[in-house]
Amino acid sequence: MIEYGQEDRQEISLKKAEKFRQYALDYLDAKKEVLTGFQLADNYAGQKERIKTALGASEREWQDWKWQLANRISSVEMLEKIFPLTLTQKKDFTTIQSKFRWAFTPYFASLMDPVDERCPVRKQMLPDIREMELTGVTDFSGEEYSSPVDNLVRWYPDRVAVHVTNVCAGFCRHCLRRRKIGEVDQATSADNLEEILQYLRDNREIRDVLLTGGDPLTFHTGWLDRILSALDDIEHIEIKRIGSRAPIVLPQRVDEELCEMLSRHHPLYINIQVNHPREITADSARALDLISRAGIPIHNQSVLLRGINDSAVIIKALNHELLKVRVRPYYLYHCQGTIGIEHFRTPVETGIEILENLRGFTTGLAVPNYIITPSGLGKTPLAPEYQISSGEGFVLLRNWEGIVYRYDNPGRSGEE
Ligand SMILES: *Cc1c(COP(=O)(O)O)cnc(C)c1O
Ligand code: SF4
């Protein structure tokens, strides 16, 4: 313990406060480079009008999630109506389409910069010829060795993930499950779903079921209601979770009717995926607010992507934007060696450095777990090291700023 004299206290406090203030000011300075969705609201509104005109859509159609899904931008012909494309791009995008399909809602297109290829929203959805290098493995996460029943993935003692569809509102270029995204929209069949439900009924230790995809919110409300009701009927299932990017890529999907239905299936949690602060807009904020008001806690799972969000400043700004719309950052996934996504990968250290720059510098609410999911082995957390060493009766630790200190360790009691 450090002992300070009475007269030093004021001076020390002032010095420390000044140092902390400087950390915060340095961040605010760096953050000027990172624009948020709210700051870009005028650009988005202009883009929206341009895209509506190009597609001949009315405002009513634009606000209709079924119109958004049915009119996903999914061909060079459609894309060139809204973005200028070079001949090479046209050729490349067509080539990629035959191997890894691409599509995204007109809404999400309105968040993309029409000319700047570095736009972090655009990069998540527009194909890149480097995808065709085909490095990486198709089933990196080893899901195919972890499915006691088709479309049910079991990595853990008490919980499973169920893939209810392969449809997404937008097909992220970095998707770890791209092998499942396939060529055509396909929901898991009724027979397969019945098999899955039977597995869940037969295994009383499963207390947590994660519905994922694809995107379960691309289903009609009635169909999702039936699946959730079937899960409610299984007594040992304590909580249900839905993994969905719809509030971000297709916020029109979230309406009173959906939220009323969801609120009848508590305890229910929703996990979303936001990778850059530009994705949080007035529209997605409205969708997230409706979900929260239905009593559903929302957590975010970002993917760490090279050239998109691989810096502490962007991730911090993102997590602050999320907390402002009552979403808790939960996971930051390391981008793994799935086929065709090598160009998005960062070294493992990048994520650890980002976490170091979050912890203490901002609230623990804004610090996600950094995760690798090696094939079939579940999620492995990676974190900066705060324990430097240990000895008899003490541990040597460092705080978030790197100040090293010795901490008296009482040792384990009752072991002698
Ligand atoms: C991510 C995942 C889960 C859930 O993991 P949590 O750490 O509980 O959020 C469960 N099963 C599978 C197959 C998963 O990929
Ligand atoms: S929303 Fe999820 S499942 Fe769908 S493409 Fe994106 S990462 Fe893959």
Image (cartoon, rainbow, N blue to C red):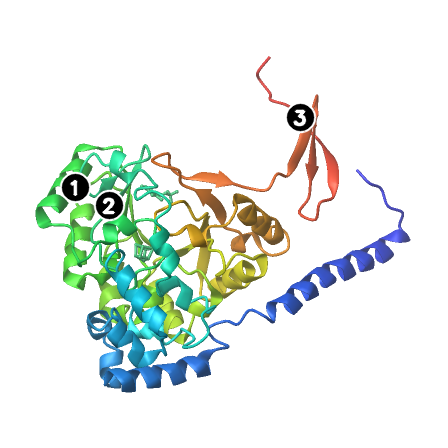
Q: Which mark is residue 162?
A: 2
Tell me if mark 2 has few (under 14), some (14-19) or many (20+) residues whose alpha carbon lies within 10 angstroms of its own.
many
Dot 1 corresponds to which residue? 196
SS under mark 1: helix
Mark 3 vs mark 1, CA separation in Å:
49 Å
In terms of depth relative to the viewer, which is nearer, 342 or 151? 342
Image position of 379 (left or right of 314): left
Q: For ligand 1, give the image quadrant.
A: top left
**Mark 3 residue type:** Pro
Whichever of labels 3 and 1 marks the residue nearer the N terminus, that label is 1
SS under mark 2: strand
Dot 3 corresponds to which residue? 410
In terms of depth relative to the viewer, which is nearer, 241 or 261? 241
SS under mark 3: loop
Residue drawn at (84%, 54%) of the image: 12
Residue drawn at (30%, 77%) of the image: 80
**Mark 1 residue type:** Ile
Asked if residue 152 can be seen in this view, the reply is yes
**Mark 2 residue type:** Val
Whichever of labels 2 and 1 marks the residue nearer the N terminus, that label is 2
Q: Marks 3 and 1: which is nearer the front? A: 1
The spot of residue 369 in percent (x, y) is: 49, 46
The spot of residue 331 in percent (x, y) is: 45, 49
Mark 2 vs mark 1, CA separation in Å:
8 Å
The spot of residue 347 in percent (x, y) is: 52, 46
> Does the residue tagged 1 have its C-beta within 8 Å of any atom of ligand 1?
no
Q: Which mark is residue 329?
A: none
